[in-house]
Amino acid sequence: MPLSDAKIRSLKPKDKSFKVSDFEGLYVLVKPNGSKLWQFKYRLHGKERKLSIGAYPDISLLQARKIKSVARAQIAVGIDPSEAKQEAKLRSREAHGNTFEKIGADFLSKQRIEGKSPATLSKTEYHLKLANKDFGRKPITEITPQIILKCLRKVEAKGNYETAHRLRARIGSVFRYAVASGLAENDPTYALKDALIRPTRVHRAAIIDPKAFGGLLTAIEGFEGQATTRIALKLLAILAQRPGELRCAEWSEFDFIEGVWSLPAAKMKMRKDHNVPLPKQALDLLNELRMISGNGVYLFPSLRSWQRPMSENTLNAALRRMGYSGEEMTAHGFRATFSTLANESGLWNPDAIEAALAHVERNEVRKAYNRGLYWDERVKLAYWWAGYLDQMRAG
């Protein structure tokens, strides 16, 4: 028989919890301590599930039946009432609490104010997106090491060990920011330091044989994809800068009169200003490129939006289209080719080559000395390298 308020009030506790049914899956669970809890049993996708409604008399018989009716309507269209309830709770917490997603967004804003490079900001956004998918809407004080580890294991299961480690570090940065802001008490990622598989360090693939590299240069010359991608690969070979620095390059950084590309510290990995000499071959390519993208901000704008730079995958994808696998050559590998062949030539001071690659000298006195000493040599090195590329391309 259906329940009545009089019957519910008359229910006495026993040594063990017991159920008293109303109808259509609604029942009262009477606990040994005397509490009476409304619950609704249902089936969805072939599985039995349960929705906790609340305690009697806080939730009256009439209210419990209404909630059950709403739940049955949700089930009819394939919605799980229990999951819908948790979703509503999360939305409420989002509105009133300090969620990981909210604090992560504040942390990202702080990085922007500090002038972090576009590459760093992009990686932070990517890592936060991965974390937010699993626990972004949880209050930061409710996130345990086990919750974070579950997220990291998903990345690790795909074989992305390096990404898993970087993700742990990024999540830790958000927690330390929260601790400093008085929003959390500790960083739970510290406990996970040794929980992840350590990645094997693999150097980026590069072609260092002059004849084979000449073949690559010839392949780039005949590349049938986007003209901007072809020019980017040719400039990457000539200038030997990091792919991220080239694809995010802006026209305002180039002095065509003096023949210098001036990269601001904010864009550099080592956070130091860096100047790159521009030989004639590079200037010719830049003038060709100006006919395509010279009216915008970036040398290599995205195909989807001129307000954003080229995707970081574009150059590697072009190498794959030309038949070069990731074990043979990468966009970053052009730097290794330059370093190897320039050093093997015996014509140049190794410190000048390191300065050309923007590798930072740790000794502050020597660093200041080298900056001035090697500029003239770096200009000569840039012109020699561009000419040597022409020779290798010609076979």
Image (cartoon, rainbow, N blue to C red):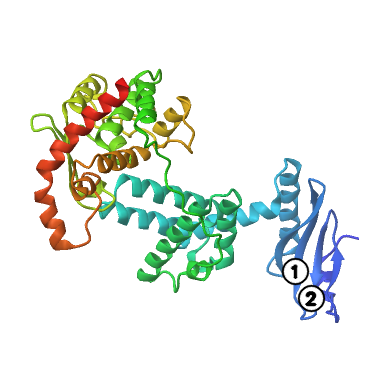
On the question of residue 5 being in view, the answer is: no
Residue at image coords 29%, 43%: 339
Residue at image coords 24%, 35%: 239
Q: Earlier in the sequence, mark 1 or mark 2?
A: 2
Q: Position of residue 26 (x, y in %)?
A: 81, 59
- Residue 144 lies in what quarter of the image? bottom right
* In this picture, residue 329 sits left or right of residue 240: right
Residue marked by disc 2: 31
The N terminus, quarter of image: bottom right
Q: CA distance from mark 1 to mark 2?
A: 8 Å
Out of 179 and 378, give the one closest to the viewer: 378
* In this picture, residue 302 sits left or right of residue 383: right
- Is residue 20 positioned above or below 129 on the image? below
Element under disc 1: strand
Out of 195 and 146, give the one closest to the viewer: 195
- Residue 37 image label: 1
Q: Are marks 1 and 2 in contact (CB under 8 Å)?
A: yes
* Amino acid type at mark 1: Leu
* In this picture, residue 61 sits left or right of residue 310: right
- Is residue 383 positioned above or below 109 on the image? above
Out of 161 and 134, give the one closest to the viewer: 161
